[in-house]
């Protein structure tokens, strides 16, 4: 894995990812009732709180899996300089991230293919459409 460089620390917090869920009418009605009664500001507030509570309940399992699978937890950014350094070393990255992995927009598909052996991201991968297309066979 490339060393963290000044440009990796300066990456700003990305916007949240949107997800879509389907709920039954009874569940949705109960959520609306709790919102109406002032327990939550809105539906999203209740859903975020429920998800965070479940993540807290399973935090030990997540930590164990992260350690076992040697995943980077959080945000990992790969600049073109990082990938060129990996390529120059004759090695290839096995990107494993739980959170967000970003590949800089100035990374060419050719550089990505030369420097990245595999990509496993539990969360989101942000890269140019061309780089994602080039790495499609290496993304699991």
Image (cartoon, rainbow, N blue to C red):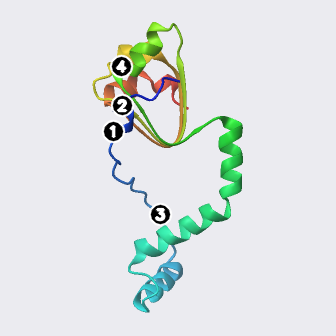
User: Which dot, 2 or 4, sits closer to the camera?
Assistant: 2
Estimate the x, y position of residue 43 in percent, counting from the top left: 42, 76
Q: Is residue 108 left or right of residue 19?
A: left
Can the viewer see residue 90 in this picture? yes
- Please rate how many residues cluster around mark 4, counting C-alpha atoms within 10 Å: few if below 14, some from 14 to 19, many from 20: some
Marks 2 and 1, how far apart at CA: 6 Å
Residues 97 and 119: in front is 97
Q: Residue at x 32, y 22 (%)?
A: 107
Tag 4 residue: 81
Is residue 81 positioned above or below 10 on the image? above
* Among numbered discs 4 and 3, the one appearing first in the sequence: 3
Estimate the x, y position of residue 86 in percent, counting from the top left: 47, 15
Q: Are marks 4 and 3 in contact (CB under 8 Å)?
A: no
User: Which dot, 2 or 3, sits closer to the camera?
Assistant: 2
Q: Are marks 2 and 4 in contact (CB under 8 Å)?
A: no
Q: Are marks 2 and 1 in contact (CB under 8 Å)?
A: yes
Tag 3 residue: 21
- Please rate how many residues cluster around mark 2, counting C-alpha atoms within 10 Å: few if below 14, some from 14 to 19, many from 20: few
Which mark, residue 6? 2
Residues 127 and 66: in front is 66
- Placement of the C terminus among the 4 image quadrants: top right
| SS assignment at label 3 | loop
Is residue 65 positioned above or below 103 on the image? below
- Please rate how many residues cluster around mark 1, counting C-alpha atoms within 10 Å: few if below 14, some from 14 to 19, many from 20: few
* Among numbered discs 2 and 3, the one appearing first in the sequence: 2
């Amino acid at each position: 894995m490339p060393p963290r460089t000044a440009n990796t620390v300066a990456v700003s917090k990305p916007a949240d990812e949107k997800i879509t869920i389907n709920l039954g009418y009874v569940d949705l009605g109960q959520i609306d009732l709790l919102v109406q009664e002032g327990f939550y500001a809105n539906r999203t507030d209740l859903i975020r709180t429920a998800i965070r509570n479940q993540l807290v309940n399973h935090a030990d399992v997540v930590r164990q899996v992260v350690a076992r699978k040697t995943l980077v937890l959080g945000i990992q950014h790969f600049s073109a300089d990082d990938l060129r350094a990996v390529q120059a070393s004759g090695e290839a990255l096995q990107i494993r991230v739980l959170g967000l992995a970003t590949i800089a927009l100035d990374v060419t598909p050719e550089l990505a293919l030369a420097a990245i052996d595999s990509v496993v991201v539990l969360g989101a991968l942000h890269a140019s459409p061309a780089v994602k297309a080039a790495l499609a066979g290496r993304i699991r």
